[in-house]
């Protein structure tokens, strides 16, 4: 990392420390404002969820959102470099690296440190991809580009929302606009962008393959399927189509934009004690879709009941 990059990291960290209450908000309204209601409730695989509990599970506290989680290898050339609750993934290749999700601008230095802790150079990030156009996933895009020169790519349907995302007045960089089914390749690794709209118009589920011990695994980086409190006809259509699409994707290793969506912390704990790779877990590939589809139908039923005369 060059001296300018180090200077940016120090200044960004100092800004958060000195201006935490003003510049670094501490409420769950960062992801949804106002917070969702605590109903309806659904039970999936023995666990009960409400819209509020799902949001709390995903976001955690402000400390969770900005604290480095132990960076670790997931499978093959795929690594976790995010915080306790906000996912960021590094995909390494001989020709440079791909980063999925910059998270908040204030957590970009955390991601850069995780990349370095794994023995890689943050400046070797050549492509920056996003999961969906919310600040907790893509606010840091401009700073990542400033620090690495990476080419920023985004799904077409999320471009308007990304363009409105201007931390500190920075213009949101978009070097290439992607469309459903388009491939992104670097150094022998290819990712496929699947439009799974609903949570945002351009919510993107990424798929790729990873090789470990001579075996090839299908990896899915899921985009949130968490429905809003009010379901419009357009959103209903999007979610219905997206849930069906996600269920049809080949998957051995399911990841997500929040670690809780794939039980990241529990699987990491198992990883540390050895044995089979806990992230290779095809049975969990549809768990998040199961939870969110159940919630989607429950919210829709509640909304339809309230509309009856």
Image (cartoon, rainbow, N blue to C red):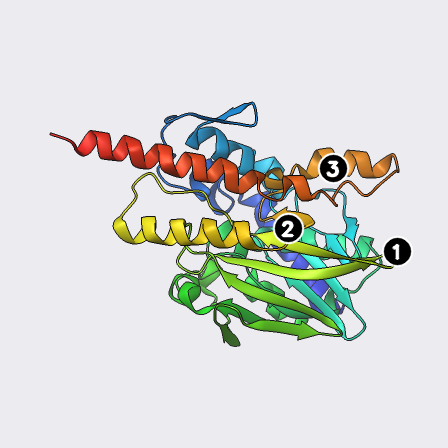
Q: Is residue 145 above or below residue 233?
A: below
Label 1 to label 3: alpha-carbon separation:
19 Å
Q: Earlier in the sequence, mark 1 or mark 2?
A: 2
Residue 10 point in image, percent of width and height: 68, 55
Which residue is painted at 68% across and 44% down in the image? 282
- Secondary element at image label 1: loop
The residue labelled by disc 3 is 267
Label 3 to label 2: alpha-carbon separation:
30 Å
The residue labelled by disc 1 is 213
- Give the label, 1 or 3, closer to the camera: 1
Looking at the image, how many numbered discs can be counted on the residues?
3
Residue 207 point in image, percent of width and height: 62, 60
The residue labelled by disc 2 is 13
Q: Where on the picture, by quarter, is residue 51?
A: top left
Q: Quadrant of the C terminus?
A: top left
Q: Earlier in the sequence, mark 3 or mark 2?
A: 2
In this view, the residue in front, 80 or 237, is 237
Is 242 situated left or right of 67 in this image? Answer: left
Tell me if label 1 and label 2 are in contact, CB under 8 Å.
no
Residue 180 point in image, percent of width and height: 48, 68
Badge 2 density bin: few <14, some 14–19, many ≥20, Cα 10 Å: some
Which residue is painted at 66% across and 74% down in the image? 185
- Secondary element at image label 2: helix
Q: Quadrant of the N terminus?
A: bottom right
- Label disc, if present, on residue 97 of the rendered structure: none
In this view, the residue in front, 234 or 114, is 234
Q: Is residue 157 visible?
A: yes
Label 1 to label 2: alpha-carbon separation:
39 Å
Is 86 situated left or right of 242 in this image? Answer: right
- Give the label, 1 or 2, closer to the camera: 1
Residue 4 point in image, percent of width and height: 70, 68
Tell me if label 1 and label 3 are in contact, CB under 8 Å.
no
């Amino acid at each position: 990392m060059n001296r300018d990059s180090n200077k940016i990291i120090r200044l960004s960290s100092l800004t958060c420390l000195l201006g935490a209450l003003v510049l670094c908000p501490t409420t769950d309204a960062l992801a949804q404002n106002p917070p969702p209601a605590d109903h309806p409730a659904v039970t999936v695989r023995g666990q009960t969820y409400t819209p509020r509990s799902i949001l709390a599970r995903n976001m955690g506290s402000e400390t969770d959102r900005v604290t480095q989680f132990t960076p670790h290898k997931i499978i093959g050339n795929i690594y976790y470099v995010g915080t306790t609750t906000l996912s960021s993934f590094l995909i390494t290749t001989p020709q440079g690296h791909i980063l999925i999700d910059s998270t908040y601008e204030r957590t970009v230095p955390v991601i850069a440190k995780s990349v370095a802790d794994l023995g890689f150079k943050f400046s070797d990030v050549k492509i920056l991809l996003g999961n969906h156009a919310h600040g907790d996933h893509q606010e840091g895009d401009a700073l990542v580009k400033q620090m690495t020169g990476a080419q920023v790519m985004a799904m077409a349907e999320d471009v308007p929302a990304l363009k409105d995302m201007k931390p500190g007045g920075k213009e949101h960089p978009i070097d290439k606009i992607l469309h459903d089914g388009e491939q992104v390749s670097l150094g022998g690794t290819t990712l496929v962008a699947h439009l799974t709209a609903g949570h945002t118009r351009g919510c993107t589920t990424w798929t790729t393959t990873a090789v470990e011990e001579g075996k090839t695994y299908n990896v899915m980086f899921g985009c949130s399927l968490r429905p809003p409190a009010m379901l419009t006809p357009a959103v209903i259509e999007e979610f219905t189509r997206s849930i069906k699409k996600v269920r049809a994707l080949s998957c051995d290793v399911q990841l997500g934009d929040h670690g809780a969506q794939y039980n990241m912390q529990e699987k990491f704990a198992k990883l540390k004690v050895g044995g089979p790779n806990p992230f290779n877990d095809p049975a969990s590939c549809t768990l998040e879709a199961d939870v969110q589809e159940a919630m989607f139908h429950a919210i829709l039923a509640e909304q339809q009941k309230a509309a009856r005369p």
